[in-house]
Amino acid sequence: MMTVNEVSKLAGVSIRTLQYYDSIGLLKPAEYTESGYRLYDDATMENLQQILLFRELEFPLKEIKEIVSRPDFDKKKALEQQIELLTMKKEHLENLIAFARGIQNGGNNIMDFTAFDTSKLEEYTRKAKEQWGDSKAFAEYEKKSSARSKDDEKKLWKDFMNLFGKCGTIKDSDPKSAEAQALVKEIQNFITKNFYECTNEILAGLGKMYSAGGEFTTNIDNVGGTGTAKFVSRAIEEYVK
């Protein structure tokens, strides 16, 4: 058994963070002493490793808790996907470093933005979350989508993107502001009404994708101005806390 202080030093996680993980039911100690001190065994430490890997991939705590608490959660399969995602993230960072050095040395084409393309990582993340998450959302989306005509779809997506245009008008404000949070709520309600039930967990995942680069970020920034996607992502992050 290890004390919370020993775990903190070994894992590089603050005692306060471990206490918080306990309070929200994300990582419960193996047991408590009579004095109320937390004790961690090997199984608990293994769970902490899983949590920290998800955190490195920028998954929200609420989403991590939902994933690891599922009865069918497969640690081995999750680890394989985490390794794949981390490898893609590493390759993406290496490409960015090489790209930046190319600019520094005056050798890069100023119109070359391929290093910022994260579409492959986004697609893999989406598939991973689809497997970990509730597939009913995707079934609901297909059902609602099949009932609409092409013109209906075009109008729907236009209305949806208009919401991000509204976000663009306040993108320089505080993401925690009442106006920003009201727009996030409007986005969540729109998704629930027209696509699938947008829980806070699903919304958190969408927020990450919105600011991850690639097509999502480009489309949002096109209607709201540069920086809108990141602003929406930060506002969503505050909303789902």
Image (spheres, helix red, strand yellow):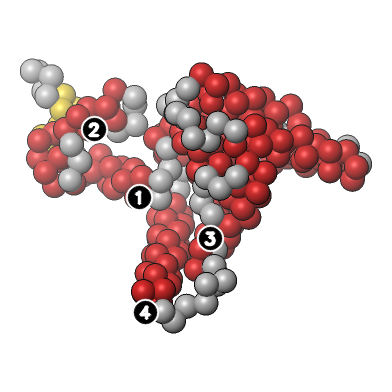
What's the residue at 49%, 26% (across, down)?
Answer: 239
**Of label 4 and label 1, which has the lower sequence position?**
1
Lower position in the chain sequence, tag 4 or tag 3: 4
- Vertically, is 123 above or below 30? below
Q: Position of residue 98 (x, y in %)?
A: 39, 74
Q: Earlier in the sequence, mark 2 or mark 1?
A: 2
Foreground of the two, 72 or 146: 146
The one of 5 and 228 positioned closer to us in this rendering: 228
Closer to the camera: disc 1 or disc 3?
A: 3
Q: Residue beneath label 1, please?
A: 56
Quadrant showing the N terminus: top left
> In the displayed structure, does residue 161 sit left or right of residue 202?
right
SS type, badge 3: loop
Compared with 237, 149 (above or below) is below
Residue 163 lies, in percent from the top left, at: 67, 33
Looking at the rendered structure, the kind of residue marked 3 is Thr
Label 2 with label 3: CB-CB less than 8 Å: no
Contact check, label 2 and label 4, Cβ < 8 Å: no
Q: Circle 3 is placed at which residue position?
A: 118
**In 3D space, how far apart are the residues under numbered discs 1 and 3 (Cα atoms)?**
17 Å
User: Of the residues under marks 1 and 3, which one precedes in the sequence?
Assistant: 1
Name the residue located 70 percent from the left edge and 28 percent from the top edge.
190
Q: Residues within 10 Å of mark 1 (few under 14, many from 20)?
A: few
Residue under circle 4?
105
Q: CA distance from mark 2 to mark 4?
A: 42 Å
* Other residues around mark 3 within 10 Å, as few (<14) / some (14–19) / many (≥20): some
Residue 142 sits in which quadrant? top right
Question: Would residue 79 be visible to someone looking at this image?
Answer: yes
Query: Helix or strand or loop: what does disc 4 sit on?
Result: loop
Between marks 2 and 1, how big is the CA–CA gap?
A: 15 Å
What residue is shown with label 2?
17
Tell me, for residue 134, which label it has, or none: none
